[in-house]
C-alpha cells in the first residue's frame, strides 16, 4: 500500500514538473521577465545568460521550451539548425543602448561622432559585453565604429561575458564607463545614464522569441502568448523596453 502511494506521489510530482515551462532568456531580460513570470498563472524555470551561450547550450541538447535572444543572429543560428518552431517566432521587444557611469559621478559626455571617449576613460577601461559574440557588445561595437571612435578605444575595452556582468563592473566602480542597454541601467541604482546612443548608429535592437523544436509542453505556447499580451507588455514598458522596431 505504501509503495503504491509513493508511486502515485512520484507520478504526480513528475506530471507537475512536466508542466513547468523551461525558458532560456538573455541576461538583460532578467528583472522584467522575472516579474512577468510571477504575474503568469503557470510555472516557469528561467535560465539567464548571454544569448550565444544559451543558443550553444540548446544546440548541444540542453532541455528548454522557449528561447528569447537579444538579437536576430542567435535566433537565426538556431533556425538554421532547425531547432526552433519557425511558425512561433516573433519579435517581442526593442531596447536602447546607453553609456553609463557610476552614480556618484556628475560629468557630461555628448555622444556624437568623434566624441572623446578615450579622454574620459583616462587610464582605465570601458566595460562592455563581448563585442564579437554577445548582442549588447556587438551593438556597442557597431555604434562606436559608426561614431568613429572604436579604433581608438578597442584596446581599452574590458569585455564581459554578458551585459549584466558589464553593468556590474561599472556599478562596483571597477570601470568608469560602460555600454549596456537602457533597461539594465534602470535596474541598477549604482549607475547613471550618461547618454543614449543614436538609434541609427547601430542595427536595431530586437528581442526575438520562439518555441524550441523539441518543446512538447503545451504550457510553453501559453506562456509565449502571455508574453505578447497587454499585462506582460505593461511590465516590459515599466522596465524600459520598447515595442520591437518595424
Image (cartoon, rainbow, N blue to C red):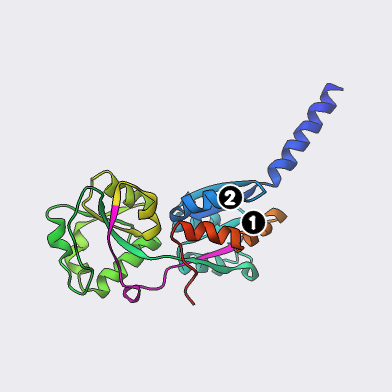
Judge whether residue 63 can be spotted in this image. no
Name which residue lies at 37% across and 60% down.
181
| Callout 2 secondary element | helix
| Callout 1 secondary element | helix
Mark 2 in CB contact with mark 1 (< 8 angstroms): yes
Dot 2 surroundings within 10 Å: few (below 14), some, or many (20 or more)? some
Residue tagged by mark 1?
Answer: 223
Real-space Cα distance between discs 2 and 1? 8 Å
Name which residue lies at 52% across and 48% down.
47
| For residue 19, above or below residue 108 | above
Residue tagged by mark 2?
Answer: 37
The magenta stretch spans residue 195: yes
For the N terminus, the image quarter is top right
Name which residue lies at 62% across and 69% down.
86
What is the magenta range?
A: 192-211
For the image, the number of numbered tags is 2
Report the residue that reaches farthest toward the top.
Answer: 2
Q: Which of 3 and 166 is in front in this view?
A: 166
The picture places residue 215, in percent across and down from the top left corner, at 66, 56
The magenta stretch spans residue 194: yes
Q: Which mark is residue 190?
A: none
Q: Nearer the viewer, residue 142 or 181?
A: 181
The picture places residue 116, in percent across and down from the top left corner, at 15, 66
Going from N to C along the chain, the mark reached first, 2 or 1, is 2
Dot 1 surroundings within 10 Å: few (below 14), some, or many (20 or more)? many
199 sits left or right of 2 in the view? left
| For residue 15, above or below residue 101 | above
Amino acid at each position: 500500500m505504501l509503495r503504491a502511494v509513493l508511486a502515485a506521489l512520484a507520478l504526480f510530482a513528475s506530471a507537475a514538473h512536466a508542466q513547468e515551462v523551461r525558458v532560456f532568456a538573455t541576461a538583460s531580460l532578467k528583472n522584467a521577465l522575472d516579474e512577468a513570470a510571477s504575474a503568469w498563472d503557470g510555472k516557469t524555470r528561467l535560465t539567464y545568460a548571454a544569448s550565444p551561450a544559451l543558443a550553444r547550450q540548446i544546440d548541444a541538447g540542453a532541455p528548454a521550451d522557449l528561447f528569447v535572444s537579444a538579437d536576430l543572429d542567435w535566433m537565426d543560428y538556431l533556425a538554421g539548425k532547425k531547432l526552433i518552431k519557425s511558425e512561433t517566432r516573433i519579435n517581442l521587444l526593442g531596447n536602447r543602448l546607453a553609456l553609463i557611469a557610476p552614480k556618484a559621478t556628475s560629468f557630461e559626455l555628448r555622444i556624437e561622432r568623434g566624441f572623446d571617449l578615450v579622454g574620459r576613460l583616462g587610464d582605465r577601461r570601458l566595460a562592455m559585453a563581448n563585442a564579437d559574440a554577445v548582442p549588447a557588445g556587438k551593438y556597442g561595437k557597431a555604434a562606436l565604429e559608426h561614431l568613429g571612435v572604436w579604433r581608438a578605444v578597442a584596446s581599452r575595452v574590458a569585455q564581459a561575458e554578458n551585459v549584466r556582468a558589464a553593468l556590474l563592473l561599472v556599478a562596483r566602480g571597477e570601470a568608469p564607463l560602460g555600454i549596456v542597454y537602457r533597461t539594465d541601467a534602470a535596474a541598477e541604482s549604482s549607475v547613471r545614464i550618461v547618454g543614449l546612443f543614436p538609434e541609427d548608429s547601430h542595427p536595431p535592437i530586437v528581442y526575438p522569441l520562439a518555441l524550441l523544436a523539441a518543446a512538447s509542453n503545451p504550457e510553453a505556447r501559453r506562456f509565449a502568448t502571455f508574453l505578447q499580451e497587454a499585462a506582460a507588455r505593461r511590465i516590459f514598458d515599466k522596465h524600459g523596453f520598447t515595442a520591437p522596431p518595424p
